[in-house]
Amino acid sequence: MPNDPQIAGRAPIVTELQPGTYYWCACGRSKTQPFCDGSHEECGMEPKEFTIEAAKRCAMCTCKHTKNAPFCDGSHKSLP
């Protein structure tokens, strides 16, 4: 199905984020994981906008199956 996300990775990307607005890739097609690069345009999925209020270290989901998007919740551990 074209609206199912592609698995971009099977482990989170841990990164230090500064205050600001970000766009997390929800489709799995971005070449700049875990962030959107516009690759979703042909699949009909939209990135998830989120805001960071204070600098913090984040584990960003790359499997695209998290229930806590854009952050990793360990869902990658149960993927086939």
Image (cartoon, grey):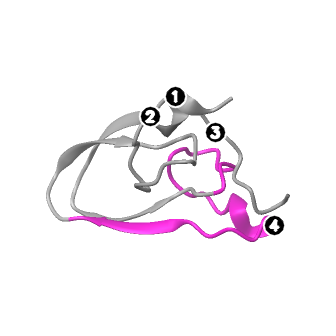
| Coordinates of residue 38 in the picture (x, y in percent) | 65, 63
Q: Earlier in the sequence, mark 2 or mark 1?
A: 2
Residue identifier under label 3: 8
Residue identifier under label 4: 42
Q: Earlier in the sequence, mark 1 or mark 4?
A: 4
Q: Secondary structure at mark 1?
A: helix
In this rendered view, identify the residue nearer to me: 60 or 32. Answer: 60
Q: How many marks?
A: 4
The magenta segment is: 27-52
Q: Amino acid at mark 3?
A: Ala
Q: Secondary structure at mark 3?
A: loop
Residue identifier under label 1: 77
Q: Secondary structure at mark 2?
A: loop
Q: Residue at x 50, y 53 (%)?
A: 35
> Pointer 2: residues within 10 angstroms few (<14), some, or many (20+)?
many
Residue identifier under label 2: 12
Q: Amino acid at mark 2?
A: Pro
